[in-house]
C-alpha cells in the first residue's frame, strides 16, 4: 500500500545518506527528532552537566596530586605495586588504606574519564560550535552495554526487545517532556557527531532540517536507507480515529479476542517501560501473527484510512 505513513526508501542522491553512513558504525538504524524546548531549559540542562563534570575533573586532579605515584604504578605495572624500604615498614591497615585509595583513584581515571572525554568532544563541542537554538536536531543510536546484551539474545527476542525500545524512544510524551539532549533512553544514546553534521547541512542550505522531524532511519535487506516518519503517527486524534477503524474492521472479520486485547492495551495507563505493559504489547503482536495478519501493516493501513477520511471532511462540509 502506497502511503506516507509507511517506510520510504531514500533516493540515491539524498544528502542524508552520507550523514547516516558516516555515523552508522554498522548498526543500520538511528532515530532523529527536532528539539523545540525553551532555550532557557537547554541552557539549564547544559549548565548542570557542565558543573557536574567540572567537579569530577577537579576531584580527579586533586586525587592525582595526592596519590599520583600509586595510581601511576598500578596503571603501568598491572596492579603490582611495590614501594621502597621505608614505606614497606608500614602496618597492615596502612597498606589496606593505600590500596583502597588507589582503587578509588583508578576508578576515577578508568571509568569516569571516558565519560568526561565523551562530554567534551560531544555536548560541549556542539554548544561551542552551534550555541543554543530554538530548534535543534537530535540523533540517537543504539549503543552501550544494554545494546550489547540485546545483540546476545536469540533473533526473535532481539527483535522484540529492539522494537519495544524503539516504541519507548519515539514516545510522544517522552519527547515532549524532555529537552533534546536529555533523551537517552535504554540502548538509544545521543550521537552528537550526527547532530553536528545535520546542523551543518541545514546551515549550508543543503538539507531542510524539517526532514529530521521524529523519524526512524533504517537499512533494509538490500542495505538501502529508508525512513519511517514516526511524527506522522503522533497525532492523538488521528491515532484515536485509526484505532476505532481497526477495531471495527477486526470485529467484522470475527477477531473479537484480538479486539478485546487491543482495548485493554489502549486503556492501560502504564508507561511502555513497565514490564506488564511490555508483556501486553508482546502478546498483541504474537496474537496478530496467529490470527494471520501483521500488526504493523494493519496499523499503517488504518491510520492511512483515517487520514484520508479526515482530509475529506472539510470538502463535505
Image (tube, rainbow, N blue to C red):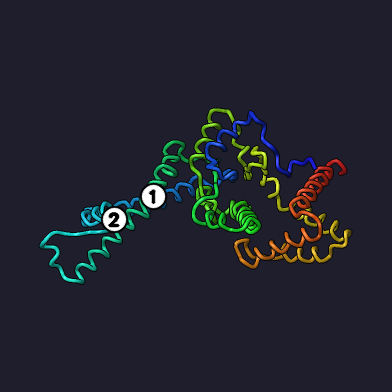
Examine the rendering and report whether any part of residue 8 can be seen. Answer: yes
Disc sitting over residue 78 in the figure: 2
Residue 12, placed above or below residue 101 = above
Q: Nearer the viewer, residue 112 or 180?
A: 112
Q: Nearer the viewer, residue 292 or 216?
A: 292
Q: Secondary structure at mark 1?
A: helix
For the point 88% across and 59% down, the residue is 253
Q: Is residue 236 left or right of residue 27?
A: right
Residue 122, placed above or below residue 51 = above
In which quadrant is the N terminus drawn?
Answer: top right
Q: Picture coordinates of residue 29 (x, y %)?
A: 60, 45
Q: Picture coordinates of residue 243 (x, y %)?
A: 78, 56
Q: Secondary structure at mark 2?
A: loop
Q: Is residue 296 left or right of residue 119?
A: right
N-terminal of the pair, mark 1 or mark 2, is 2
**Mark 1–mark 2 contact, CB under 8 Å?**
no
The residue at which mark 1 appears reads as 114
Q: Please rate how many residues cluster around mark 2, counting C-alpha atoms within 10 Å: few if below 14, some from 14 to 19, many from 20.
A: few
In the image, farthest residue toward the left:
86
Report the Cα–Cα distance between label 1 and label 2: 20 Å
For the point 53% across and 30% down, the residue is 203
Amino acid at each position: 500500500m502506497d502511503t506516507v505513513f509507511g517506510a520510504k526508501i531514500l533516493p540515491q542522491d539524498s544528502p542524508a545518506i552520507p550523514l547516516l553512513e558516516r555515523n552508522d558504525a554498522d548498526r543500520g538504524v538511528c532515530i532523529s527528532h527536532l528539539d523545540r524546548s525553551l532555550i532557557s531549559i537547554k541552557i539549564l540542562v547544559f549548565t548542570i552537566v557542565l558543573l557536574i563534570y567540572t567537579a569530577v575533573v577537579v576531584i580527579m586532579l586533586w586525587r592525582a596530586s595526592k596519590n599520583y605515584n600509586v595510581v601511576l604504578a598500578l596503571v603501568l605495572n598491572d596492579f603490582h605495586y611495590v614501594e621502597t624500604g621505608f614505606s614497606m615498614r608500614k602496618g597492615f591497615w596502612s597498606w589496606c588504606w593505600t590500596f583502597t585509595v588507589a582503587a578509588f583513584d583508578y576508578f576515577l581515571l578508568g571509568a569516569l574519564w571516558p565519560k568526561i572525554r565523551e562530554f567534551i568532544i560531544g555536548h560541549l563541542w556542539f554548544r561551542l560550535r552551534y550555541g543554543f537554538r530554538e530548534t535543534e536536531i537530535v540523533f540517537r543510536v543504539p549503543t552501550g552495554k544494554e545494546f550489547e546484551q540485546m545483540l546476545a539474545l536469540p533473533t526473535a527476542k532481539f527483535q522484540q526487545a529492539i522494537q519495544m525500545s524503539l516504541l519507548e524512544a519515539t514516545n510522544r510524551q517522552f519527547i515532549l517532556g524532555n529537552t533534546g539532549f536529555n533523551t537517552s533512553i535504554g540502548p538509544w544514546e545521543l550521537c552528537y557527531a550526527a547532530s553536528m553534521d545535520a546542523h551543518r547541512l541545514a546551515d549550508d542550505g543543503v538539507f531542510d532540517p524539517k526532514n529530521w522531524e521524529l523519524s526512524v532511519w533504517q537499512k533494509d535487506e538490500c542495505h538501502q536507507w529508508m525512513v519511517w516518519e514516526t511524527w506522522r503517527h503522533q497525532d492523538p486524534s488521528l491515532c484515536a480515529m485509526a484505532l476505532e477503524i481497526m477495531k471495527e474492521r477486526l470485529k467484522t472479520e470475527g477477531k473479537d479476542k484480538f479486539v478485546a486485547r487491543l482495548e485493554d492495551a489502549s486503556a492501560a495507563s502504564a508507561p511502555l517501560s513497565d514490564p506488564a505493559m511490555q508483556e501486553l504489547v508482546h502478546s498483541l503482536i504474537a496474537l496478530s501473527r496467529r490470527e494471520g495478519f501483521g500488526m504493523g501493516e494493519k496499523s499503517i493501513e488504518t491510520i492511512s484510512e483515517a487520514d484520508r477520511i479526515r482530509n475529506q471532511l472539510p470538502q463535505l462540509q
